[in-house]
Image (spheres, grey):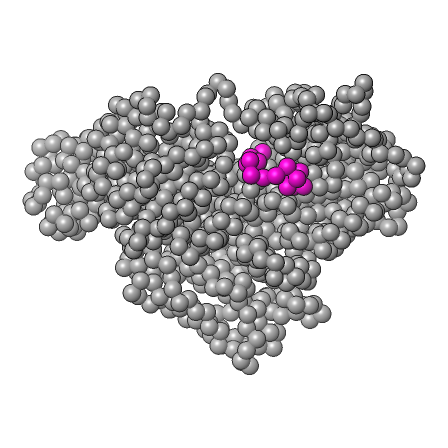
């Protein structure tokens, strides 16, 4: 199991990873261990010795496994960005300072959609190259090699979550240095602001293990090769990141919200070199880079040539289609049942819950009239705003929701995400309404597959949209749920960007689903075209869409047509064969990304009849899936650290103590803060926590100075989308008489609403995507009052400009 260790660095917390049998042996003598150093290596949870050091028995009591520090000397990352794909080559250098050969294992975070395909180790000038094999076979090869004294490497995906990889190195000779090299491909999507975003996960947060994960499952996930324990890095190591951007796109600029980068742009702006500045990268957060192309929304179609000697997918050419379809406003529907599910577990404390609270306010104010909604808060338990189910969006229900908004805190314990989702699906959707779920979470759980499977079973009746918050959030959970629920997902690494990402998802959510989607390739000779994955993707207006198509090498593509129906309108996008750009890439980036996309879909389906196909595709492309692994053995090197007469330490089980009971005790000890007792939503209501502050917000009396920030303006908007003249005076700081007599109008409130909209345009133009739905709602109010919306807006802009 995973047990949290107290660490003197409050920014990070370490794991102790041991096997189930070891925990049974330790029994009640299990203790918390205080780390003596403050820096944890996010790239390696390393350190187990051979059998003789596994566990020591003294007077029928057991001591914890001995820690052999294998020093992390350097991390070197090379990133190559080509258009909307990236290749990452990670090199990790470790030094075994002991005199003994050690067997080591560690975990590293990866993006859920990353195609991991290469693993090598260089030890003493000798290279061990791993190959992709069926997992059980690979594990047996590794185990046999280590037992016989040979140096071996093994890399495989976590048994429970696709965004964590386990790497093992057996028989690292004493005094030697090992350079471990891992390579992967990643898709890059165009974000709301037009940036192509690249994020390198470097933080592996503790994952909450819910009650419905069995000890055997959890143990298999975290300790497949034996006893191991966290190694705390006591001395500095180097962390270098270098990136190249190339691939036929004109680069406008390259930036980062969190990193200080040195960017050298070529004279023609077609390529760039990016390095970290002299201050270096501190690996306490995920590294990110934003690439702005001059025309990111233009359709790009790339054809990557296959391997003539390859098999399966690798033999054919692979076409990657990048689209940005646009739908008309008529595609937006008000007949939605929208469920806002917010993570209130302890790990959401601080800026995360504050941003979630502000986002909930923006969400509530942006809902269209006529919809149904509910708010579900969850942690170790869950609570519904409306216990009887979703309620119609009215002034009264909005007022109650605003009361909840003012009291929401990260005080609900662990992250039991499965139960609230089950509760939602236990009742059918409102007849005639499309049910949509939007989830906000920091996504640190182990039962990802359970949740994805449940969401997938109900995808025909409920769409799921997800937002991951903060460094180390599980991309397997966030992207996996959106894929299973036929929705869309975003990751947010800066909390102040949360509102922007969520409102972008809300706009997608309010769109009607695209029906009868057809992707037609006109080719010569006909036939042989295969979409990967085989099911057409979910299409949302304004969102970056990536599709992969397998094409025979001798086939000419004449045209590509993507069409479908949204609401009562048909959309159709046609592209000529001349738009297709052919490339030759030795690493077969697009082929491997297509394989990963297909594997992800199969792993969501979780059907036995696709297991053989999944393994075949994984072996052909080298892309690791849950059923395969990368394994390599140095057969030529003289066996080290091998003692055929060594006997394993005898193991005894402490009487009366079960592993499951200890697991429950550890959960209580780790995830609940005694100084901040958890209250249910009902208990907080009974204590009067939704009193004066909630009332002041719902009545429009914001505690923040009006107009000073966007949220204060949002909080003053009424249920029908309007602002009063008094609101406009507070927001703009203009005299009441000036605003009242500035122009002619049929309705004073519609004029005041126009003034506030003009104020938003003037002061918060950069945040327009956040308040766009509010503005639509306000304009509909003005129109219902019988006023000319554009005429009032022109007058309002003039008043603000002159004063």
Extreme residue in the front direction: 656
Is-magenta flag for residue 210? yes
Q: Nearer the viewer, residue 138 or 471?
A: 138
Q: Closest to the observer: 354 or 23?
A: 23
Image point (30%, 54%), residue name: 431
The question of residue 214 being in magenta is answered with: yes
Q: Which residue is drawn at 30% across and 66% down?
A: 569
Residue lying farthest bottom?
525
Indicate whether 490 appears above or below 621: above
Which segment did they paint magenta? 206-222
Give residue 752's position: percent from left, percent from top: 15, 39
Q: Is residue 695 above or below residue 373?
A: above
Q: Which residue is drawn at 76% across and 23% down?
A: 62
User: Can residue 336 be spotted in the picture?
Assistant: yes
| Residue at screen point 88% across, 37% down | 641
Q: Is residue 765 visible?
A: no
Q: In which quarter of the image is residue 231?
A: top right
Tell me the quarter of the image containing the N terminus: top right
The residue lying furthest to the right in this view is 645
Quarter that holds the C terminus? top left
Place of residue 403 in the rendered image (x, y in percent of width and height, measured from the top left):
29, 30
Near-viewer residue (755 or 50):
50
Return the x and y of residue 686 as percentages of the image width and height: 32, 23
Instruction: Tell whether 131 sits left or right of 582.
Output: right
Q: In which quarter of the image is residue 749?
A: top left
- Tell whether 46 sits left or right of 410: right
């Amino acid at each position: 199991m995973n047990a949290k260790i107290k660490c003197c660095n409050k920014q990070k917390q370490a794991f102790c990873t041991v096997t189930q049998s070891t925990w049974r042996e330790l029994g009640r003598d299990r203790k918390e261990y205080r780390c003596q150093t403050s820096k944890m290596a996010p790239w390696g949870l390393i350190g187990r010795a051979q059998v003789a050091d596994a566990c020591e028995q003294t007077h029928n009591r057991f001591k914890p496994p001995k820690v052999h520090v294998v020093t992390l000397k350097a991390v070197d990352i090379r990133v190559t960005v080509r258009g909307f794909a990236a290749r990452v080559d990670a090199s990790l250098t470790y030094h075994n300072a002991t005199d003994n050969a050690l067997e080591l294992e560690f975990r590293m975070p990866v993006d859920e959609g990353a195609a991991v395909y290469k693993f090598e180790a260089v030890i003493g000038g000798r290279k061990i190259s791993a190959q992709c094999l069926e997992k059980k076979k690979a594990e047996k090869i590794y185990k046999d090699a280590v037992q016989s004294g040979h140096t071996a490497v093994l890399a495989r995906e976590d048994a429970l979550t696709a965004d964590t990889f386990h790497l093992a190195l057996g028989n690292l000779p004493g005094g030697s240095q090992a350079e471990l090299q891992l390579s992967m491909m990643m898709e890059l999507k165009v974000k709301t602001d037009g940036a192509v975003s690249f994020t390198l996960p470097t933080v592996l947060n503790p994952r909450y293990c819910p009650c419905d994960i069995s000890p055997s499952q959890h143990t298999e996930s975290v300790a497949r090769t034996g006893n191991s324990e966290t190694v705390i890095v006591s001395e500095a190591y180097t962390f270098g990141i270098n990136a190249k951007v190339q691939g036929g796109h004109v680069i406008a600029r390259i930036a980062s919200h969190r990193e200080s980068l040195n960017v050298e742009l070529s004279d023609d702006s077609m390529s760039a070199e990016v390095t970290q500045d002299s201050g270096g990268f501190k690996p306490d957060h995920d590294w990110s880079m934003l690439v702005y192309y001059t025309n990111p929304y233009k359709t790009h179609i790339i054809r990557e040539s296959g391997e003539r000697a390859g098999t399966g997918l690798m033999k054919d050419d692979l076409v990657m289609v990048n689209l940005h379809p646009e739908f008309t406003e008529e595609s937006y529907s008000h007949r939605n049942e929208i469920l806002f599910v917010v993570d209130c577990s302890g790990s959401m404390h601080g800026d995360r819950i504050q941003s979630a609270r502000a986002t909930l306010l923006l969400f509530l104010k942006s809902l269209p009239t006529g919809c149904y909604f509910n708010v579900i808060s969850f942690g170790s338990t869950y609570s519904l705003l409306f216990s009887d189910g979703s309620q119609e969006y009215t002034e009264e229900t909005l007022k109650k929701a605003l009361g909840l908004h003012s009291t929401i805190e990260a005080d609900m314990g662990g992250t039991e995400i499965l139960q609230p989702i089950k509760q939602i699906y236990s009742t059918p959707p409102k007849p005639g309404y499309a049910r949509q779920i939007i989830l906000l979470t920091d996504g640190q759980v182990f039962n990802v597959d359970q949740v994805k499977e449940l969401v997938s079973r109900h995808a025909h009746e409920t769409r799921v949209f997800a937002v991951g918050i903060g460094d180390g959030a599980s991309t397997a959970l966030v992207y996996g749920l959106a894929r299973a629920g036929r929705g869309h997902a975003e990751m947010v690494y800066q909390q102040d960007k949360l509102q922007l990402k969520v409102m972008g998802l809300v706009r997608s959510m309010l769109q009607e689903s695209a029906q009868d989607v057809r992707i037609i390739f006109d080719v010569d000779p006909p036939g042989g075209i295969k979409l990967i994955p085989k099911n057409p993707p979910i299409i949302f207006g304004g969102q970056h869409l990536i599709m992969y198509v397998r094409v025979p090498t001798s086939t000419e593509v004449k045209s590509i047509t993507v069409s479908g129906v949204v609401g009562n309108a048909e959309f159709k996008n046609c592209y000529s064969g001349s738009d297709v750009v052919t490339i030759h890439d030795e690493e077969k980036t697009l082929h491997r990304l297509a394989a990963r996309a297909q594997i992800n879909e199969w792993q969501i389906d979780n059907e036995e009849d696709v297991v053989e196909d999944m393994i075949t595709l994984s072996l052909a492309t080298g892309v690791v899936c849950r059923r395969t692994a990368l394994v390599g053995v140095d057969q030529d090197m003289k066996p080290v650290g091998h003692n055929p007469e060594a006997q394993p330490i005898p193991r005894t089980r402490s009487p009366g103590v079960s592993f499951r009971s200890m697991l429950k005790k550890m959960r209580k000890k780790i995830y609940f803060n005694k100084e901040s007792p958890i209250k249910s939503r009902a208990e907080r209501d009974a204590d009067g926590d939704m009193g004066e502050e909630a009332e002041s917000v719902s009545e429009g009396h914001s505690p923040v100075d009006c107009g000073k920030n966007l949220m204060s303006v949002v909080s003053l908007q009424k249920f029908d989308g309007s602002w009063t003249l008094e609101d406009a005076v507070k927001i703009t700081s203009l005299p009441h008489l000036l605003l009242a007599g500035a122009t002619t109008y049929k309705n004073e409130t519609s004029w005041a609403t126009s003034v506030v909209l003009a104020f938003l345009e003037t002061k918060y133009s950069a945040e327009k995507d956040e308040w766009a739905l509010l503005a639509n709602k306000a304009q509909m109010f003005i129109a219902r009052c019988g006023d000319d919306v554009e005429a009032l807006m022109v007058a309002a802009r003039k008043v603000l400009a002159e004063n």
